Image: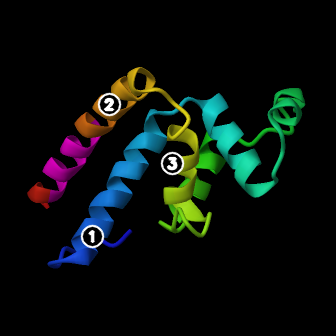
Amino acid sequence: MNKFRSPGNTWRKEKEELRLDCWWEDGDLGDKRFVYEGYVSNKSLEDIEAMTEKESKSEGYLDKWWNNLELGNRCKREGKKFIYWAMMDPLSKEEKAPILENMRECLNKKLASLKEV
């Protein structure tokens, strides 16, 4: 991601990407593998659970994949926005609350570090 800030949509998109990155960072390795295999390979939950450790991608590989993924579009079923929406939409309000709180804290830290630059 570019480290520049300009008015309007560019900054909103950068902030949204930071927010989605916070969501990704907060996820555990199993969740990241589920997202990756479901999005890239269209594997079912059963297929993913049956994968051996050797077949599964490492956390470093998954993080690199996420960082290279475009912001995308939920309606076009692509990119970070679609993945976030697909994973969060089925959750109840109570299940979402701690995730959103962690995202807010992470985003505030990231924004504070950008202000220091």
Q: Position of residue 96 (x, y in %)?
A: 41, 29
Q: Nearer the viewer, mark 1 or mark 2?
A: 2
Residue at numbered disc 1: 3
Residue at numbered disc 3: 84
Residue at numbered disc 2: 102
Tag of residue 55: none
In the image, is 31 to the left or to the right of 54? left
What is the spatial separation of the Cα atoms under label 1 and label 3, in whole angstroms? 23 Å
What colour scheme governs how the chains and residues are painted in the rendered image of this protein?
rainbow
> What residue appears at the point 39 percent right and 30 percent down from the top-left corner?
99
> What's the residue type where badge 2 is placed?
Asn
> What residue appears at the point 56 percent right and 29 percent down from the top-left corner?
28
> What's the residue type where badge 3 is placed?
Tyr
What is the spatial separation of the Cα atoms under label 3 and label 2, in whole angstroms? 15 Å
* Magenta residues (range): 106-114
The image quarter containing residue 14 is: bottom left
Q: Main secondary structure of the magenta part?
A: helix
> What residue appears at the point 62 percent right and 33 percent down from the top-left corner?
31
Foreground: 24 or 88? 88
Q: Earlier in the sequence, mark 1 or mark 2?
A: 1
- Crowding at mark 3 (Cα within 10 Å: few <14, some 14-19, many 20+): some
In the image, is 35 to the left or to the right of 12? right
